[in-house]
Amino acid sequence: MMSSKRKCNRDIEQRGKKKEKREETTEISEIIVATDVKEKVKEAWRKNEQCTHGGIEVDCNPFPHCVLRNFIQDQTFVENLQRELLNLNFHDKSNDLYKFKQSDDLKKRKEPYIAGLRAVLFQQFRSWLAEVLQVELEPTVDISCAKYEYTDILLCHDDELEGRRIAFILYLVPAWDQADGGTLDLYSTDENYLPQKVVKSLVPSWNTLMFFEVSPISFHQVSEVISEEKCRLSVSGWFHGRSLDRPPRHIEPAPPRSPHLPRDEELLFEWINPVYLDMGYQEQVQEEFEETSEILLKNFLKEDKFKEVNEALKQNEIRWVRRGPPNKRRYERADQQGLPPCVSACWELLSSEAFFLLLSNFTGLKLHFLAPGNDEEEGEAEEKEGGGREENGEGAEGSSTGCPAVTAAGRPQEVKEKAKTSREDSTPVCRGEVRRWGHGDYTLVHDTDLDNTEFALDLLLHCGCEDWQTEFGGFTSYIANGEDEELLTVNPENNSLALVYRDKETLKFVKHINHRSSTVAGNRHHGNAFYDFSFVYYE
Ligand SMILES: O=C(O)CCC(=O)C(=O)O
Ligand SMILES: [Fe+2]
């Protein structure tokens, strides 16, 4: 009974649907299609010039783009389109580059106004574009709908992907102001085609379509939405055609690495919570680390030492230098010259010979020639070579079992491969930075980053994060290359030492620090910043 009744209902629904209109048709505004306007836009684009006419603006700086106000002729069509879009399911999207909501795929949606928009964009508008820009554009439909609300963002990127020729965005937003955030910011680029700074911000507005040429210099971002009420709804996509030639990507020089500084274990006794200097405890830490490839050692520094460093980092004497480029990172690094003495001393601690040995004990990695190797094959080989490895009281304790890296699927064989290729005779090295993190800062994952494609031990020691909350961002996220799923997150937490051993398929980023971080009342210096010592050690 039940099933036949349901079937009956469905029949009625389907019959109802058949009567429904499949597609609402619409056209782009007369002013845009007018012959004289078309000619002007065409001329400006060809000559790389600027031109304004009514609601139309072409500008070739910092790269060719165009704003078309009142894009769709019929207001009610746009209102109905907005209603349909808001009725779709939206999914939270979040990774290193963005945080926003994306709708179900628009490519195949049957809603009449969505279907109508698809038609007008990929038929009437596509031929307008092809003629005005003098490019061939394929009929490929590439379109989606995005919703940016409070603290949502899309960081600096260039849109480049095989086949994408022209990017477009149609805004369906309420009255919008620069102060609401959510502007489309265009970046200038330097001689290496790297983005430098925002030189133009476009404030979204109702029924405005903006398009630009996708190229090696088309760097742009959607700035963080600061308005707590407004919703920045947009439909965006790409017209496909032959991609422009891309010059070889700039390769950043790898930051310099140094061997340990010759300092003995006195330094450890002076600085480190005695709990962590107990050999028995170190063995326990190593056991846990070898299981999970990560560990968090709370209250790591002695309390008075931590306090001293924590205060010193907030002093004005440190010269903070902003780091870019924005398609890779944004944060400040302390200039090593002129660091307060206790900050320098903490740096020295983390770079010291004694600390390399301590890390070997915590992790089972061979970060000192006196530390035992970390896989059995090597242990056997060394013994055959005559053994007699010198034992060292402070550093050589611990088992010599393999240490897996933080990886998506746990690939111990890769660890062994690496052990064979790069371990022999290499001197363990490290590199470090003292960083300041405030509103707007982030790092992005870049698979072209050579520095990220090696086995390495990451160390993070956070300071100044007294009332930091996860929802502010600023946490370090480890992911498998090419996937958004998180393997591990390290939250900013005062005086916690985080150690993570990562393999070459594991990438990390610091999540964009959003506007919520600056809303908490706090009497901190430099807004609501926190600090970290970020070191990387290589066997
Ligand atoms: O919404 C915008 O203004 C730009 C969106 C964008 O850059 C993108 O989706 O790639
Ligand atoms: Fe984009």
Image: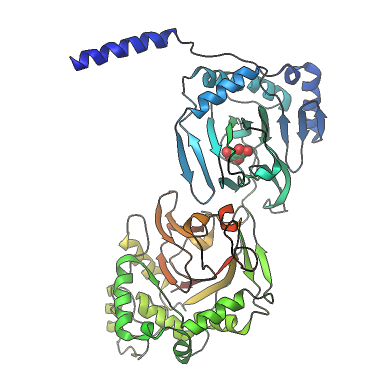
Residue 204 can be seen in this image: yes
By what rule are the colours in the image chosen? rainbow
Residue 246 lies in quadrant:
top right
Taking 78 as reference, is 65 above or below it? below
Question: Residue 219 location, x and y as percent?
Answer: 65, 45
Along the line of sight, the residue nearer the viewer: 29 or 471: 471
Along the line of sight, the residue nearer the viewer: 198 or 128: 198
Residue 402 can be seen in this image: no
Taking 389 as reference, is 132 above or below it? above
Seen as rendered, the residue at the extreme left is 1
Taking 44 as reference, is 16 above or below it? above
**Identity of the residue drawn at 50% across and 39% down:** 101
Left or right of residue 478, residue 156 in this image: right
Along the line of sight, the residue nearer the viewer: 393 or 256: 393
Question: Residue 93 location, x and y as percent?
Answer: 48, 43
Q: Quadrant of the N terminus?
A: top left
Along the line of sight, the residue nearer the viewer: 100 or 251: 100
**Identity of the residue drawn at 41% across and 78% down:** 359
Residue 441 lies in quadrant:
bottom right
How many circles with numbers are drawn on the protein?
Answer: 0
Question: Residue 268 location, x and y as percent?
Answer: 45, 87
Taking 506 as reference, is 256 above or below it? below
Left or right of residue 499, residue 242 in this image: right
Q: Quadrant of the C terminus?
A: bottom left
**Identity of the residue drawn at 73% across and 18% down:** 33
Ligand 1: give its quadrant. Answer: top right
